[in-house]
Image: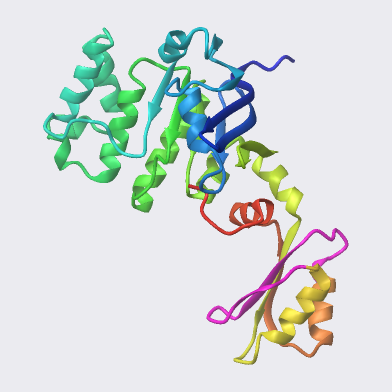
């Protein structure tokens, strides 16, 4: 079965003076999927998105977005994409309905399309309120609805849930997943790695201007291994347990005195939970819990990028 790619780039490069922001970035995003574009600050994600959305021209390389050549047919690309930035771009002095109807008129779309999206995003009841009275979550939904008026093939989302409360974040996440299920391709950047874990079909970890690691969340976690963790009983020192985990995993353990936990990442497939418990018990350490589980995406990020920081 042949895979059709909504976003396909090869060797994208971009230089700002002496700084090489992109060093041959390759991307392949299948139609109707959510791709999480993650990486440390300064990795090149923002430059990549600006190029893929025709806001910047690459110095080298090529890309096709929704079947259109990025360099030869930027107008064709723009007709097939939508971009929703970190901050809502709607007019606070217009109502929710007026905002969408204005965008619809500019796009030569019927007014009914705006009303349809107000209903779809749960804003029909607030359609006649000024946008400046909306909560942060409502503004993000209104902004997302505006981006979807023309039914784009590819939607670029930059930090769509930053600053939102958990309920609003969940609403946006549900909307994004629903878009992919209906065939829209979504390229997502986010500082919430748990969000990428939940939403993304595939993740591209960008570092130093290249796609350093690609795969499903499960595949990236498998690259790292497992996380061994014990919860100690009582108020004794954590050092002895850390020494055991250091020896078993070959990784420097992390200690949490408040939670009384010691944990470490291990790539050793022979380490089992019974063996972990036996080794801890043999060292005379009393524990109330032990686990051996896949790492979180945060742990994968820190391990694979080799440095601490944010994925923003």
- Which residue sits at x=35%, y=24%? 147
Q: Position of residue 233 (x, y in %)?
A: 64, 87
User: Residue 162: where, in percent of width, then height?
Assistant: 38, 47
Say whether residue 196 is visible: yes
Q: Position of residue 127 (x, y in %)?
A: 17, 30
Q: Residue at x 84, y 86 (%)?
A: 282
Residue at the far right in the pictured view: 270
- Can residue 215 be seen here? no
Q: Is residue 138 left or right of residue 81?
A: left
Q: Which quadrant would residue 106 be assigned to in this image?
A: top left
Query: Which quadrant of the view contains residue 149?
Result: top left
Decide if residue 140 is on the left or right side of residue 297.
left
Give the percent coordinates (x, y) of residue 172: 39, 39
* Residue drawn at 61 percent across, 35 percent down: 201
Residue 268 lies within the magenta run:
yes
Q: For residue 144, what is the image quadrant? A: top left
Q: Give the answer, above or below, for where 267 lies relative to 143.
A: below
Q: Is residue 121 above or below residue 226?
A: above
Placement of the N terminus among the 4 image quadrants: top right
Q: How many marks?
A: 0
Residue extending farthest front:
18
| 295 is higher (above) or lower (below) than 204 | below
Q: What are the residue bounds of the magenta stretch?
A: 251-273
Q: Is residue 190 magenta?
A: no
């Amino acid at each position: 079965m042949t895979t059709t790619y909504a976003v396909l780039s090869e060797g994208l490069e971009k230089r700002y003076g002496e700084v090489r922001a992109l060093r041959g970035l390759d991307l392949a995003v299948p139609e109707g999927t959510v791709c999480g574009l993650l990486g440390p600050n300064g990795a090149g994600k923002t430059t990549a998105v600006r190029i893929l959305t025709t806001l910047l021209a690459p110095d080298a390389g090529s890309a096709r977005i929704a079947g259109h050549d990025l360099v030869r047919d930027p107008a064709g690309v723009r007709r097939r994409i939508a971009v929703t930035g970190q901050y809502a771009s709607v007019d606070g002095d217009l109502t929710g309905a007026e905002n969408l109807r204005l965008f619809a008129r500019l796009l030569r779309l019927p007014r009914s399309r705006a009303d349809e999206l107000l209903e779809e995003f749960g804003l029909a009841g607030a359609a006649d309120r000024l946008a400046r009275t909306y909560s942060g979550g409502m503004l993000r939904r209104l902004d997302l609805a505006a981006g979807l008026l023309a039914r784009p093939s590819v939607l670029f989302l930059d930090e769509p849930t930053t600053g939102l409360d958990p309920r609003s974040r969940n609403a946006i996440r549900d909307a994004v997943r629903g878009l992919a299920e209906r065939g829209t391709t979504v390229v997502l950047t986010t500082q919430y790695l748990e969000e990428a874990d939940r939403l993304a079909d595939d993740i591209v970890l960008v570092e130093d201007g290249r796609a350093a690691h690609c795969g499903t969340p499960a595949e990236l976690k498998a690259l790292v291994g497992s996380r061994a963790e014990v919860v100690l009983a009582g108020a004794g020192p954590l050092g002895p347990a850390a020494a055991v985990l250091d020896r078993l995993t070959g990784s420097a353990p992390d200690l949490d005195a408040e939670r009384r936990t010691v944990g470490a990442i291990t790539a050793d497939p022979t380490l089992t939970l019974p063996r972990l418990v036996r080794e801890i018990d043999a060292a005379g350490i009393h524990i109330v819990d032990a686990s051996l589980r896949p790492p979180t995406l945060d742990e994968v990020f820190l391990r694979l990028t080799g440095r601490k920081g944010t994925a923003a």
